[in-house]
Amino acid sequence: MRFRIILFLLIGNFVFLPIDAKLIKVLAIGNSFSEDAVEQNLYELAKAQGDSLVIGNAYIPACTIDMHMFYLDTSTKRYAYRKVVGGVKKEEKGVDLQRIILDEPWDIITLQQGSLCSGLPETFKKLPALKRAVKLLATNQKVDIWWHMTWAYAKSFKSGNFEVYGSDQQYMYKSIVNCVRTEVPKANITTIIPSGTAIRLMRYRKGDILNRDGQHLSLTLGRYTVACTWCEMLTGKSVDGNSYHPHSIKEEDARLCRMVAHEAVFMHKLRQYDVVF
């Protein structure tokens, strides 16, 4: 009788486990823009559709491709390693990038450029070397290296940094798109997470309210939109009908965020990034 009870419980567990559920381990080698993208909402969105993520973020503020390459070559312990497991985020400071890469058999590792340089082609020269070095360190021989396409600054942002793009949001966005099209393929990276396109589309629908300081995303619509974009890219499942959104976002706005994320991913698959308004 005891054996039958145990067998019944095991069968019951299998019955309720979605057959298409995925466990995906993803590491973002980034900066504060990857912090905006992956450290909140992403785990919960995947969980709501039956998937599970292990999320890592190798974080240094404003870190560029060249800086990541230097810190990797010199084993510099400057990273804050943020890791989300089971929906719980923990942080370890003073970590080198090698140890972060070796910490898990990551399925996907994403690279990105510092926001100021994200539309400047001359700053991408070391991307092929960084990609090769990261892939050689990865313990999962089937690891995929993806590119995180970040977003342009808010129109109202006042900074000498923005002057590199003529303080013009549309020009900055087009410059980022240009680098995605011309520079990222030189590293043989073909999969793009189109966060920048999703934010561009959301601005078209809601106005230029997606940032909290002109650069980083708002804690509500901005971060949620980008998390939806990442979720759909990572799992391959449409977020359009996903049931999760934080309480700080109204259901109507959450539906719009998910729709926009889905649209951005669809545009990415067609290699269409131009959004002009």
Image: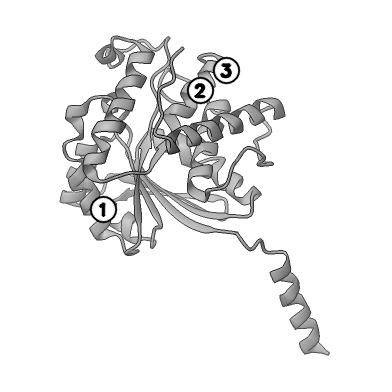
Relative height, residue 228 to residue 237 (above, below): above
Relative height, residue 189 to residue 50 (above, below): above
Relative height, residue 43 to residue 4 (above, below): above
Dot 3 or dot 1: first in sequence order is 1
Q: Position of residue 187 (x, y in %)?
A: 23, 44
Q: Position of residue 223 (x, y in %)?
A: 52, 31
Q: Residue furthest right?
A: 1
Amino acid carrying mark 3 in the image: Arg
**Residue drawn at 21 percent across, 49 percent down:** 72
- In the displayed structure image, the side of residue 273 where residue 94 appears, left or right: left
Q: Nearer the viewer, residue 176 or 159?
A: 176
Residue beneath label 2, please?
201
Q: Position of residue 29 (x, y in %)?
A: 33, 44
- What secondary structure is marked by label 2? helix
- In the displayed structure image, the side of residue 153 where residue 95 appears, left or right: left
| Marks 3 and 1, how far apart at CA | 38 Å
Q: Is residue 28 among what the camera can see? A: yes
Q: Position of residue 221 (x, y in %)?
A: 57, 26
| Marks 2 and 3, how far apart at CA | 7 Å
In contact (CB < 8 Å): disc 2 and disc 1: no
Residue beneath label 1, please?
134
**Residue drawn at 70 percent across, 26 percent down:** 252
Amino acid carrying mark 2 in the image: Leu
Label 2 neighbour load within 10 Å: few <14, some 14-19, many 20+: many
In contact (CB < 8 Å): disc 2 and disc 3: yes
Residue beneath label 3, please?
205
Q: Nearer the viewer, residue 184 or 247?
A: 184
Dot 2 or dot 1: first in sequence order is 1
Label 3 neighbour load within 10 Å: few <14, some 14-19, many 20+: few
- What secondary structure is marked by label 1? helix
